[in-house]
Amino acid sequence: MSKVISRLILLLICIVHLVPFYLLLNMSFKPLTDTSSKWQPAAAMSLDNFSSAWNEAHLSRALTSNLIITVCSIVLVVLIGSFAAYPLARHRTKWNNFVYMLSISCLIVPGLTILVPLYKFMVDIGGMNQYWAIILVQVTFALPLTIFLMTGFMGTVPKELDEAALIDGCSRYSIFLRIIMPLLKPIIATIVIVLGVQIWNDYQFSVFFLQKPEVKTIPVALSGFITQYHSNINWVAAGCLVAMLPMTIAYLLLQKYFIKGMADGAVKG
């Protein structure tokens, strides 16, 4: 009996998660002339929504902006986060513990609470509508979680590896680059997936700091389809399907490292 109940609960959870995907697919392929309920399957499948969303929202340009911001941010986050986490994981001094606690305490700071001073700062330094500025913002907000996960994961790597390498004549930099970094693949994959999706879908910073059409990201570009006087949900659904493809492919390629990285990084942190 308990197995039946647990399977029913699992089935219910699956249905709850699949309903949004059904609505997204149904609306993206439903022609604009079909005004039936969004729950009702489309009488005829059409690709017009994809072509309209691609042309009207300039998704090719928006995809380029997303790729530049996401790739550059993730590369910087991985490099800076790993360099910061190595001494924090290997040397548990009072000062390092203070720096670690200070870093992860930033996780509880909502981005919107500092949006106004951050906007003023961006205007002062000429960072409006600049890729380097939004990348700097994304890296700043992604680093606390990166340091938390990487410090926890490096804690699972035996210190005897460092000691053996030191005896063989390696410097600290060589140990980090030649021994520690290759072992970080699971946690790097986790960071790429978790923070990559977060940066890829970012709206709260992009809508304020990337206002020119040439640098708009996909969420901001698609938001133009929903205004006070009209909305085109079908085009938004088609655009969302196109936008989710790159991160879905990245997840499928890195999924075998994902669970291991999350478990080791979080539990040991």
Image (cartoon, rainbow, N blue to C red):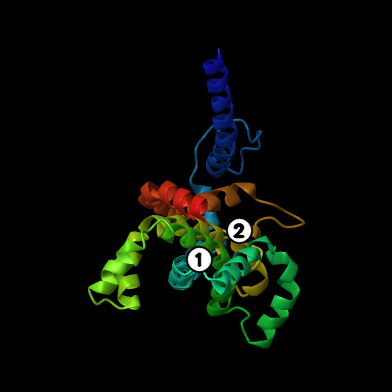
Which of the two residues, 111 or 201, is positioned nearer the viewer here?
111
Q: Residue at x 53, y 40 (%)?
A: 25
Give coordinates of residue 52: x percent, y percent. 54, 55
* Residue 155 seen in the current view: yes
- Please name whichever residue, 269 or 256, is drawn nearer the observer in this view of the structure: 269
Of badges 1 and 2, the one in the foreground is 1
Image position of 106 with respect to 251: above or below: below
Snapshot quadrant of residue 211: bottom right
Residue 66: image tag: 1
Residue 135 screen position, x and y as percent: 54, 73
Kindly identify the residue that appears in the image at 49 percent across and 66 percent down. 70
Please give left or right for residue 160 compared with residue 64 in the image.
Answer: left
- Residue 216 visible in the snapshot: no
Q: CA distance from mark 1 to mark 2?
A: 13 Å
In the displayed image of the protein, which residue is found farthest to the left? 168
The residue that disc 2 covers is 222
Q: Please tell me whether mark 2 sits on a helix, a strand or a loop.
A: helix
Dot 2 amino acid type? Leu
Q: Quadrant of residue 43?
A: top right
Amino acid type at image mark 1: Asn
First-in-chain label (1 vs 2): 1
Query: Secondary structure beneath disc 1?
Result: helix
Disc marking residue 184: none
